[in-house]
Amino acid sequence: MGSSHNQCRILTKCIVFLFIFVSCQPQTTTNKQTKTSNEIDTPTEQPVVVIDPLTIDSALDALPILPKDSDSLRIVAVKDTVPKKPLVLTNRKITDSLRRVLDTKPKHIYLTFDDGPLIGSRAIDSIITARNIKINAFLIGKHAHMSKHLNKSYQIYYNNPLVDCYNHSFTHANNRFQFFYSNPQSAFEDFDRNEKDLELKYKIVRMPGRNIWYFDDIRRVDLSTGGSTADMLYSHGYKIYGWDVEWRINGVTGKPVQTVDQVYTRIKNYMNNKSSLFPNNVVLLMHDDMFQNKLGQKQLSALLDSLQQHKDYTFEFMRDYPFKY
């Protein structure tokens, strides 16, 4: 994968040089530019990415990471799903005295795993069961029907009292999120189908491709295209939960991007700064396919070991979110 990626970058650099050279030529060379660009294609026949760079470096930085074929319906680049926000207390002003009080209270972590059942689901189940840790699995019905192995992984999750199973839609929008949410009724029916198909119990949803919160008197929508679907879900008794911290994955390899220490530090900062949606409550987003190999499983175990060192940290189900003080 490394050599093919380098080759792709070399080809891209050549394309960008050619683009800059041709753009300086008379208009009659336009057809030549188009022909030359079309003649260069990737071995996997991925769609051509149109680049309008100001410089070669900016063009290279703008390239997406092309995913390999996998059993996940999700395509994730190595960026947070939503733009990063600085850990600054702007909307919620917490006084020093209140902060000191909160610091004496228990601190609650919600480990959430999206897109299961997948190859990594059984490893996750084994790791958390050995540590007696609660987790939250946001499941895709389509995955549960892909194979006997994945269906068994779903059943293992479902029958484990340490695992709460929730709704992540039946199709994961087939990764066409804007199109999916452009028809709120159809999107709602996809979630409702998943709730029934997987026999889920709590009417708790995480919307694929969106970091939306909608429960009680809280309504936070990151991208407006998901708002109408969220409203419809809420009006039918569903609660929608997003996340505070994301442990990102590489869209090509499915492996974790950040180190264990980076994720652990970010969780700790959110907890200490009281900058999560609710102070003393931090929701961590992960994906099942991050932990399908031994390296990923070792990293998950190391993160849990680090978090368990804090005697005032407890692991909770999303159905109990949030604990208020």
Image: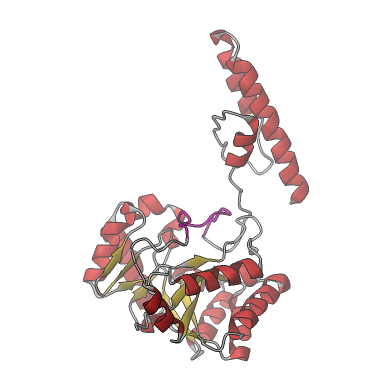
Query: Residue 164's quadrant in the figure?
Result: bottom left
Residue in the foreground of this view, choosing between 135 and 292: 135
Q: Is residue 255 above or below residue 278?
A: above
| Farthest-out residue, right | 3
**Looking at the picture, does residue 21 appear above or below residue 248?**
above
Q: Residue at x 66, y 28 (%)?
A: 15
Position of residue 228 measured from the top left corner of the image (x, y, whole percent): 26, 58
Q: Nearer the viewer, residue 306 or 79?
A: 306
Place of residue 171 in the rendered image (x, y in percent of width and height, measured from the top left): 43, 63
Identity of the residue drawn at 40% across and 83% down = 101
Q: Main secondary structure of the magenta part?
A: loop
* Residue 65 on image: x %, y %: 61, 48
Which corner quadrant holds the C terminus?
A: bottom left
Q: Is residue 97 magenta?
A: no
Q: Is residue 304 left or right of residue 86?
A: right
The residue at 31%/74% (across/down) is: 239
Number of labelled discs?
0
**Residues in magenta, as a range:** 74-86
Q: Quick check: can you spot residue 21?
A: yes
Q: Position of residue 150 (x, y in %)?
A: 56, 75
Q: Nearer the viewer, residue 181 or 296?
A: 296
Horizontal relation, residue 235 to residue 257: left or right: left
Q: Is residue 219 left or right of residue 263?
A: left
Furthest residue to the left?
A: 235
Q: Residue at 43% x, 58% y: name it.
A: 209
Question: What is the quadrant of residue 31 in the picture?
Answer: top right
Whether residue 259 is situated above or below residue 24 in the rendered picture: below
Residue at the extreme front: 97
Q: Quadrant of residue 47?
A: top right
